[in-house]
Image (spheres, helix red, strand yellow):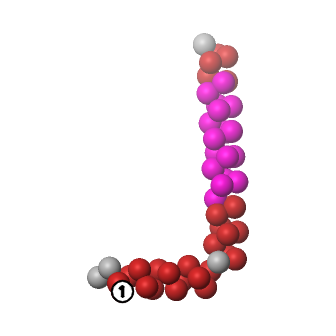
Amino acid sequence: MFQKLECRIYFKKANNFRLDTIFKKLFHLYKINHPFLELFSYVHKYTLK
């Protein structure tokens, strides 16, 4: 029982860490491509109205 709980906590931490790194990578990519993304969202907004 206790081992199972410990395992779950470990996996939860691992998942959080993985998500965190994914978000950091995405944010880094976002910072690099910011002007492009802004343009894309602008076009997206006004062509799909």
Q: Quadrant of residue 8?
A: top right
Q: Residue furthest left?
A: 49
Quarter of the picture holding the N terminus: top right
Name the one closer to the observer, 23 or 41.
41
**Quadrant of the rendering where the C terminus is positioned:** bottom left
Q: Which residue occupies the foreground of this view, 33 or 1? A: 33
Question: Residue visible at 59% across and 82% down?
Answer: 36
Report the residue at 70% width, 69% height from top: 28
Q: Is residue 40 magenta?
A: no
Percent of width and height locating residue 22: 66, 55
Residue at (70, 54) in percent of width and height:
21
Residue 35 percent location from the top left of the image: 61, 85
Dominant SS of magenta comes to helix
- Number of labels in the image equals 1
| Foreground pick, 49 / 6 | 49
Q: Which residue is mark 1?
A: 46
In the rendered image, the vertical position of residue 8 relative to residue 32, given as above or below: above
Q: Residue at x 68, y 31 (%)?
A: 10
Label 1: few (<14), some (14–19) or many (≥20) C-alpha neighbours in 10 Å: few
Magenta span: 7-23
Magenta-colored stretch includes residue 16: yes
Q: Secondary structure at mark 1?
A: helix
Type of the residue with mark 1: Tyr
Quarter holding residue 16 = top right
Against 34, residue 11 (above or below) is above
Residue farthest top in this picture: 1
Q: Position of residue 32 (x, y in %)?
A: 70, 77
